[in-house]
Image (spheres, grey):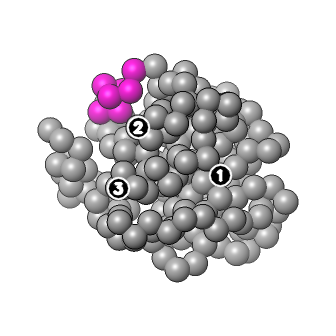
Amino acid sequence: MNNIALFLGQAIRRPSQISAVVPSSRRLARAMAGSLGPDTGPVAELGAGTGNITREILAQGVAPADLTLFELNPVFCHRLAAQFPGVRIENRPAQDMAAIGVENLGAIVSSLPLLSMPAGLQHAILRACLAALAPQGQIIQFTYGPRPPLDPQVQHDLGLAVHRGPQVLLNMPPARVYSYTRR
């Protein structure tokens, strides 16, 4: 089964776990992974889905042993394990990072639908990310909307600076990439 068929099947069976209409395009995946490389250090991907962004993270030179994927959908986890040997796959929420020893990350690449989440859940996810992130690390996130993907109050409360990245028109729907760093 190809990734689009798998994605659509899971979107129908588990709509609460799937927030996109279709998987991320190759162009969006490249924009998300573009600042990563062999010297980034450990990387975590949140909401890995069918692996389109994962593929680009690895193509940028991040070693499989340096990549941890967090994905709630067990069917996607099974597919990811088959596609990406050597990559650590966790079928659990991002908030569990500290509990399983994920730390000193050079980057976190997130496809989570943060804008659709309540501020309290955004806080919990971002606090876990910041606890796992190296001091100079970055959180890379995309959004479909016209504004940054984090609630401004959450961004302020956590001391994050936002950097507007590329807009990807050839994605369904069009998306914009943002990165967050500590102020």
Q: Is residue 124 left or right of residue 175?
A: right
Residue 106 in magenta stretch: no
Residue 98 shows in the view: no
**What is the quadrant of the C terminus in the image?**
bottom right
Q: Is residue 85 left or right of residue 13?
A: right
Residue under the image location 46 percent in, 34 percent down: 59
Residue 54, by quadrant, is: top left
The label number, if any, that marks residue 139 in the structure image: 1
Q: Position of residue 101 (x, y in %)?
A: 67, 28
What amino acid does circle 2 point to?
Arg
| Image depth: mark 1 or mark 2 in front | 2
Q: Position of residue 139 (x, y in %)?
A: 65, 52
What amino acid does circle 3 point to?
Ser
Q: CA distance from mark 1 to mark 2?
A: 18 Å
SS of the residue under disc 3: loop
Query: Magenta stretch: dominant SS?
Result: helix
User: What residue did someone put label 2 on?
Assistant: 55
The label number, if any, that marks residue 3 in the structure image: none
Pick whichever, 168 or 160, lies toward us: 168
The range drawn in magenta is 79-85
Residue 46 shows in the view: yes
Q: Position of residue 24 (x, y in %)?
A: 36, 55
Label 1 vs 2, first from the N-terminus: 2
Residue 71, above or below 169: above
User: What residue did someone put label 3 on?
Assistant: 25
